[in-house]
Each structure stands twice: as structure tokens, then as C-alpha cells.
Amino acid sequence: MAIVIKNRRGSTSDWASADPILAQGEFGIDTTLLAYKIGDGVHHWSALSFVTSGPAGATGPTGAASTTGGTGSTGPTGATGPTGPTGNAGYSGSDGPAGAKGATGATGPTGTSPGPAGPTGATGATGATGVGGTGSTGAKGSTGSEYQYLGNIDLVDINGLALKYIDGPAATVTSAFAGGVLLPNYKVFAIPHSYTGTSTLYDFTTGAWANGPAGLVTTAFAGGVLCGNGKVFAIPYSYSSTKTLYNYMSNAWENSVAGPGGGAFVGGILCPNGNVYCIGYNSVSTKCIYSTSTNAWLNGPAGWGSAAFMGGVLMPNGKILMIGYNYTGTSVLYNPTTALYENGPAFPGTNAFCGGVLLPNGKVFCVPYTTTTTSTVYNPTTNLFEAGPAGPGVAGSFRGGVLLPTGKVWCVPHNYTDTMTIYNPTTNAMEAGPAGPIAAAFWGATLISTGVVFCIPYSYTGTSTVMNPGYGYPAMPWCWHPAFNKL
């Protein structure tokens, strides 16, 4: 069976929006320009140069067929040969067939004496068209490799399935996990909250749990971030020891920074500089930035405490919108460049939101937790909230959201058990989707490469943990970007 190798790819706008750091030797393909770059493990996509299309030379050998154009040396139509220069452009192409038509030039006695001019004679009336045509085709042939098809991302109906849950692995305890991260090996690492067993990896190829690192203590972590080195930094909630780094290659915890404890953080964001900014929940400390290069805490702005924020979103302008839970002030933007807060619109407070999702239009949809406000869409251009759908008003409605390949947002049910779980940015309204199964069902979800969503079990112990949006999608690089691995 032939082996198909797929590389990271996306449109020019997708790459510009994500601007990831490609690993050393990793290919990244721009499906708009039909060009690619090779990572060095250091520079972002925007700092890398496209690789020149060296493969175009590979089509040159096929030009050897132009030797058949030698028969065109007898072409009497050598007088029209001036059009031959255009034929030279296609010399490396398979211009031989056009030369074969030069047989009609056999009556040209002059064609024999100026031997070199003979080939141009072959490009007489019919030859010119043939050479030019094959020349352009040859150029396309140079780009025609196994990478070209990766830009064709089409919807594929999966047996006409509608939005629904399908069976996945069941959790065995309540308050089990809080958030999940899609790993480079395509498994999902469910971040242990109070679960202390080893069934922490979801393998979508088997539809079952696989053994991973054991959870450590109750209410240990809340969210995780896939770092540029391929390791996962588990965001400390109540955990105050140093095993906060998961290495999927060794499938084990590694020592890193110690969490401050006390429900410190909920969620984290991988910044463009490679550091992880931890979103302050109860923390009032300045140690909120994890350096992936030094494996140590860096100082940032002090947290506000009092259950301030739950999750955050990295925006195209490089700033992070911290999603307000109880915080009602205006210091809701974190600038990784200055390591300082900046002013934005005030959140309503009182358990308002839990997590947010960056929309294709560049705005941020704040996922309602308990709020009933309609100010649920943040516009970074105006630095203001815009009207969106009102929260359902159920205490603890949703915990986190996932941008589906359709451009819609799946609001992950926590206590909400009705069906209005899909936000459509185009209509700016909620739509029906699968209902939440029970109270305290899920905390976060992860879009995997097959286009389905693995809902991270919190207190739900049933098997309806995979949400099928009704369509299958080929893998898309932006789905795997660390910025999308959030609550």
C-alpha cells in the first residue's frame, strides 16, 4: 500500500494568523501560494523565507525529448522561425511532440545548411504553439508533487450524520479532568484535576483511554499548554510541587516550576515569544510567566485574586484577552511584549464567563458561564464588547469552547443540559447542537484531526464524550497550533 505523507499546511491568512515556530526541518505549506518553508526551530513562520522551487529543474530532463525536434531541421517554414524564441522557453518541457510536426518542413533545403536554425524551424506555425504549450505545462510539473493536494480542504459528509455525541472513553471519578491538549502524536492528554489514575491519554484510533502519567493530587491542574519543545505545561491550580511538565516522548512527568497552590491559575496561553502566560484565578503573585527556555518562573503583572479570570485568548495583535469570571475592572488585556496589563472593556463579573474562542473574523467569543448578558463578543479593533447571543442563565452553563472547522463554536456543556450549544458567528446567534448529558459534565474540549471533538470529562462518567459535528475534515495545521489548545 502506498504511504501518503502529509505536512503542515494552510492558506496565507491561516499562516499569518497563527505565525507558529516550525520545528527544525519541519515543512510548512502555503496552499494559497503553492509554496513552502522549512522550519529551524527558532523563527516564526513570518520570519522564514519560502524555499525556491528547485524541483522545477527536475522537469528539465524531459526536455531531452526535444531531440525529436531535430527532424524539424528540415522544416521549410524556417522563415517563420523567429517565433522560435518562445519555443526556447519551453525547451525544458516535452516539446518533442511539436517538433514531430516539422516533418512538413522536409522540403526546406535551406533548413539543412543552418543546422542550429533548424530547431527554430520546427517551431513554425504549429511548432510554436506546441512548444509554448508544453513549456507552461512543464513549469506546473515542477510543483506537481505529493504536497500539492494538501491545499484541497473539502467538506466530506460522514454518512449524513447530524450533530450528535458518539461513544468515547468514560471517566471513572468526578472532578476528573480540566482541559485537554492535542499532542504531536495525535493523542489527547486530558489534564488531571482530581483524577489520580493513569488513564489520561485519549487515543482516537482506538476510541479508548491509553496509559499516561498519573494524576498527582486533588484539584491539581486546570488547563494545559503545548509548548514549542513539544512538552505540555500543566497549569497549576492547587498543585504546589514541581511535576508540572509532561513529556509525551517519555510519557512521564518532568520536574519544572512549582505551582503556588490555592487555586492559582485557570488556563494558560503560549505567547509569541515562546513563554506561557498563566491566567490568574486566585493568584496575586507576580510569578505568572513560565519560561520554556529556562524552565523557570518569570515575573509578570500581579494577579487580581478573587476568582478573577478563567481562560484567555491570544489575538492576532499578539495580546491576550483574559476572560473575566468575577473580575469587573478594565485591566483585561495582557501584552507579552511589555509584560504588563492594558485596559479593555469591563466584564460583568459574578461568574460571568469561562473560556473564549478566537473567531475567523478576528473577534473573540466569550463563552457564558452564568451570565445572561448579550455583551459576549469582543472586538480587538474597537477594544469594545459587541452584542452577541445572551448567556442561557444556567449557573455554570459552559466551560470552554472549540472552534469547529465550519467556523462555528461548540460551547462545551458543564451544567447546561439543553440543546442550544452552537454559536454561529455569521448569524451571531446560538443554534441547536447536542445537549449536555448531566450537570458538571465537561470541562473543556479538544478538536482532533478527524474533525470530531473530544469533550474532556469533568464529572460525567458515561461514554458520550465525543461530539461529531456531522462532517469530516482533513487535518488542518491551525487546529493543532498551541494557541488553539485552550479551555
Image: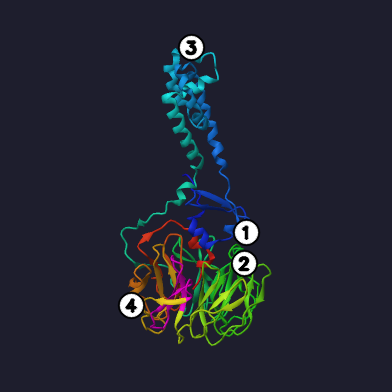
The disc label shown at residue 226, or none: none
What residue is shown at x 48% (from left), y 72% (from top)? 380
User: Could you tell me how far apart the alpha carbons at marks 1 and 3 are, in whole angstroms?
Assistant: 63 Å
Q: Earlier in the sequence, mark 3 or mark 2?
A: 3
**In x, y percent, where is residue 16?**
52, 60
Write down the residue under mark 2: 273
Neighbour tally class for label 2: few under 14, some 14-19, many 20 plus, Cα within 10 Å: some
- Name the residue beneath numbered marker 1: 43
Q: Is residue 377 magenta?
A: yes
Q: Regarding mark 1 in the picture, which secondary structure is present there? A: loop
Residue 229: give x, y in percent of width and height. Answer: 62, 63
Q: Is residue 278 shown above or below 483?
A: below
Residue 22 appears in the rendering: no
Residue in the foreground of this view, choosing between 62 and 93: 93
Which stretch is magenta? 354-383
Residue 224, above or below 406: below
What amino acid does circle 2 point to?
Asn
Helix, strand or loop under label 4:
loop
Label 3 is placed on what type of residue?
Pro
Residue 90 visible in the snapshot: yes
Q: Is residue 314 left or right of residue 274?
A: left
In primary-sequence order, the first of circles 2 and 1 is: 1
Q: Which residue is mark 4?
A: 418
Q: Amino acid at mark 4?
A: Asp
